[in-house]
Image (cartoon, rainbow, N blue to C red):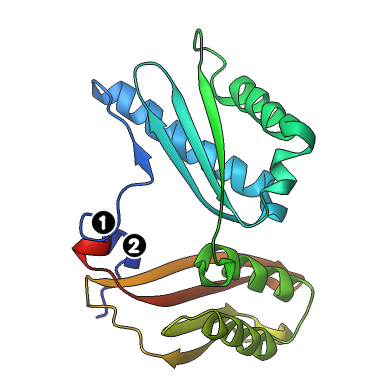
């Protein structure tokens, strides 16, 4: 039997670190903050879908909560004169920090350097194309071409479900280059989403190998 391990969590502590950084006293507080983190991420990924969300990093200390949004199109969030960030901050406080007194929430926007090397952004673009009823093989080939041109050493893309409206669900996969999944130094970005088509949900996954990371240039 195969034992599938998430490529990112497999490398946490070696080349990656946690997206959430905070400390909580007691099980009740820990579970409450963990739930809050999950809900914030789900809400932002849905609301800021057009901005190309790569990651949401959350840091908490005794004085403030800092949200860092890593996106492909920061201009869509910032707005004119930074009004968009302020509106987003007010909305988040009302929705997730309602019962807390004197909430000091800070929202930072960070731009993705190479969006074609971000698994989260590329998998969302693939899902959007499939929802527009593009042929899945064309979507897979175009994605591999974009990622390899951006400088990736290897990439694997996979779709599964009722492809092109077929009655029987199946899985199709394309691989280009190398993908050392067992090497802890390998910088492998992974993401998976579901494309909601008229025939049902199609699972979309992507693995991008961006080279090796050593301690001196981590």
Query: Which numbered tag is attached to residue 218?
Result: none
Q: Position of residue 24 (x, y in %)?
A: 28, 24
Residue 9 as seen in the image, left or right of residue 209? left
Q: Is residue 59 above or below residue 181?
A: above
Q: Where is residue 183 in the image (x, y as percent from the top left)?
A: 22, 76
Q: Position of residue 129 (x, y in %)?
A: 73, 74
Instruction: Determine if residue 62 is in view.
Output: yes
Label 2: state its secondary structure. helix
Instruction: Determine if residue 167 is in view.
Output: no
Badge 1 density bin: few <14, some 14–19, many ≥20, Cα 10 Å: few
Residue at 67%, 33% in the rendered image: 85
Label 1: state its secondary structure. loop
Between 214 and 63, the residue placed more toward the observer is 214
Between 197 and 155, the residue placed more toward the observer is 155
Q: Is residue 198 above or below residue 134?
A: above
Between 203 and 56, the residue placed more toward the observer is 56
Q: Name the residue under label 2.
A: 8
Residue at 49%, 12% in the rendered image: 100
Q: Is residue 99 above or below residue 108?
A: above
Q: Check contact, mark 1 vs mark 2: CB within 8 A.
A: yes
Residue at 62%, 90% in the rendered image: 141
Q: In this view, does 137 lie above or below 53?
A: below
Q: Name the residue under label 1.
A: 12
Residue 72 as seen in the image, left or right of residue 214? right
Question: Which quadrant holds the N terminus?
Answer: bottom left
Outermost residue toward the top in this view: 101
């Amino acid at each position: 039997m195969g034992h599938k391990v998430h490529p990112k969590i497999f490398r946490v502590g070696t080349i990656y670190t946690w997206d959430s950084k905070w400390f909580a006293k007691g099980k009740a507080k820990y579970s409450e903050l963990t739930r809050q983190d999950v809900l914030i991420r789900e809400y932002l990924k849905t609301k800021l879908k057009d901005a190309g969300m790569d990651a949401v990093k959350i840091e908490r200390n005794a004085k403030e909560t800092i949200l860092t949004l890593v996106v492909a199109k920061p201009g869509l969030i910032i707005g004119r004169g930074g009004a968009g960030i302020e509106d987003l901050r007010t909305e988040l406080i009302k929705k997730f920090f309602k019962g807390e007194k004197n909430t000091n929430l800070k929202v930072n926007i960070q731009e993705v350097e190479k969006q074609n090397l971000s698994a989260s952004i590329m998998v969302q673009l693939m899902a959007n194309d499939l929802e527009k009823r593009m042929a899945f093989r064309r979507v897979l080939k175009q994605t591999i071409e974009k990622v390899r041109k951006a400088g990736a050493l290897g990439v694997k893309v996979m779709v599964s479900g009722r492809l092109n409206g077929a009655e029987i669900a199946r899985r199709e996969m394309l691989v280009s280059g190398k993908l050392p999944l067992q090497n802890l130094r390998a910088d492998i970005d992974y993401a998976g989403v579901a494309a909601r088509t008229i025939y049902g949900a199609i699972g979309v996954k992507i693995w991008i190998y961006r080279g090796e990371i050593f301690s001196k240039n981590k």
